[in-house]
Amino acid sequence: MISSVISNGIKGVVNIPGDKSISHRSIIIPSISNGICEINNILKSDDVMHTLKAFKSMGVRIDEIDQKLVIYGKGLNSLKKPKNNIYLGNSGTSARLLTGLLSSQSFDSTLTGDKSLSSRPMNRISNPLTEMGARIKTTTSSLPLFIQGTNLAATSINIKIPSAQIKSGILLASLNTKGETNITENKITRDHTEKMLDSFGANIEIKKLDKKKYIKIIGQKELVSKNIDVPNDLSSSAFFIVCALINNNSHITLKNINNNPTRNGIILALKKMGAKINIFNQKINNNENICDITVETSMLHGCEFGPEYADLMIDEYPILSIAASFAKSPSIFRGLKELRVKESDRLKLIVLNLQNCGVNCRAENDDLFIYPTDKYETKNNVIKTEFDHRIAMAFAIMGTKLGPLEIKDSKSINTSFPNFRKEINNLGGNIS
Ligand code: S3P
C-alpha cells in the first residue's frame, strides 16, 4: 500500500466499523446464553470472523441475515467438541477469551494461530486459569494450546498484568464454575465483558476502590440472551481523528462511537494536546457509552502522559505518536511495557519507523520520547509493519503528511478495518 500526501485535508462523515472488542464478546456471550440474539453492526473483519468460525465449529447455529447476525444460544453447557483444531489467525482477543471459556468445558480442544499470534505470551492467561485447576498444555508458553476441559474450582485471582483479555478469560471460565470466583484488577482495564455479562443476567458484582477493581462472580447461573447493537470503534476512529488534526483544512464527523470511560484515553490525551474535538449526542445503549464526535485541524502541543494513560488507550500509541510528531513541542509517553507484546513489538516499530521518517525519537526502557520539528527528511520511504494492523494504519496517516510511504504487509489491516483505505480516499485521502 502506498500512502501519499494530501493537499486539502479530509472532510465529511466517516464510516467507522463496529467495535472489535465488543464484536468478539457479542459472539462469545450469546453463544453460551439461552435464547436468540440479533446483533446489528458487528465488525466483519478477519479477527472477528475467526471467533465466529470457532463457535460455528462448536455447534452453535449462527445465521447471517442481511447485515445482521443471529445467534441461537442454548446455554452454558451447550458447546460441542470441535472436529478440528480451532484456528484463530492473528486474534489475541479470541485466543485469551477462548482459553478461559474452553478450560471449563466438558471436552478437549486445541487453539492455534498465525505466526504472530503463535509468538505472543499465553502463560498470562494459562497461569491464573491453572490456579483454578485448569489443564492447559503448551510447549512454549504460547499457541498451540492444548486445553483439557474440566470442572474448575472457584477461587480468588489477583491479576498483576493490566489486561482486559486476561480478566475476560477468567470471567468466562468462572461462568461455568460452581461457587464464587473473586477477581482483583490492580489497574482497571476495558470492561466490555463485565457490562455484557451484567446485561445478560450473570450473577456479577463489581466494586471499585483505590483505583482497583474487585469483581465477584457466582458461576453456573444460566444467561439470558438480548439483542445487541455494536457501537462504532473508537480505536479505528483514532486514525481519522489524528489525520484530521494534522492535515490543514480538515473537518470530519464520526457517529455512534463507543466512548466507554475505561477506553477513551485517546480523546483525553489529544484534547490535552490542544485538539479541537467536540463530543456530543452522548447516550447509553446496551450498557455502553456512545457519542458523536467532530474534529477539525488543530495546532497540537506536546505532553507527558504517565503510565495511568496506558490502560486507557493501549492500542492508540502508534497513532498518538504520529500526532506527537506534528506537535509544536516534545512529548513523553511513559509505561508502555505492554506495547511490546501486541501484534508486534509496537514500541520498537514506532521508533524504527518514526526515525525512518526523520523524526527525532527514542525509547528508553518502556518510555517513548518524541521531539518534533517543522521539516522532516525521510531516510527511505518503506514502513516495516511485521503484519501489525495498527502500525500499518498509523503510518498510512503519516504518509498523508510525508508520503509517498510504502506500507509493507498492509493486508493486516483486514484484521480490524477492511474498509480503511476506501474510507480515507472517500474523505479526500490518497492511498493506493
Ligand atoms: C482487548 C484488550 C487489549 C487490546 C486488544 C483488545 C480486548 O489487550 O490491546 O486490542 O478486546 O479485550 P490486553 O487486554 O492484552 O491489554
Image (cartoon, helix red, strand yellow):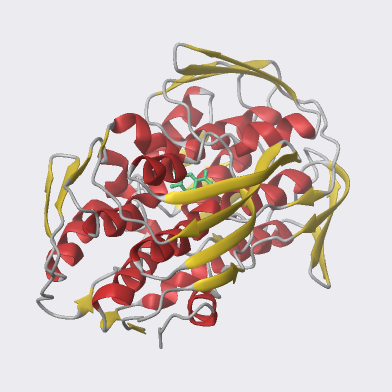
Kindly indicate the quadrant of the structure image that contains residue 6: bottom left
Quadrant in the picture for residue 348: bottom left
Residue beneath the point at 46% across and 60% down: 296
Residue beneath the point at 40% across and 60% down: 242
Residue 345, can we see it?
Answer: no
Q: How many marks?
A: 0
Residue situated in front as seen by the camera: 423 or 373: 373
Query: Height in image: 199 above or below 142?
Result: above
Image x and y of residue 244, in percent: 43, 65
Q: Residue furthest right?
A: 35
Residue 37, placed above or below residue 409 = above
> Does 114 sit above or below residue 184?
below
Q: Residue at x 19, y 80 (%)?
A: 381
Residue 396 visible to the viewer: yes
List x then y, in percent, for residue 406. Answer: 27, 82
Q: Position of residue 325 (x, y in %)?
A: 22, 58
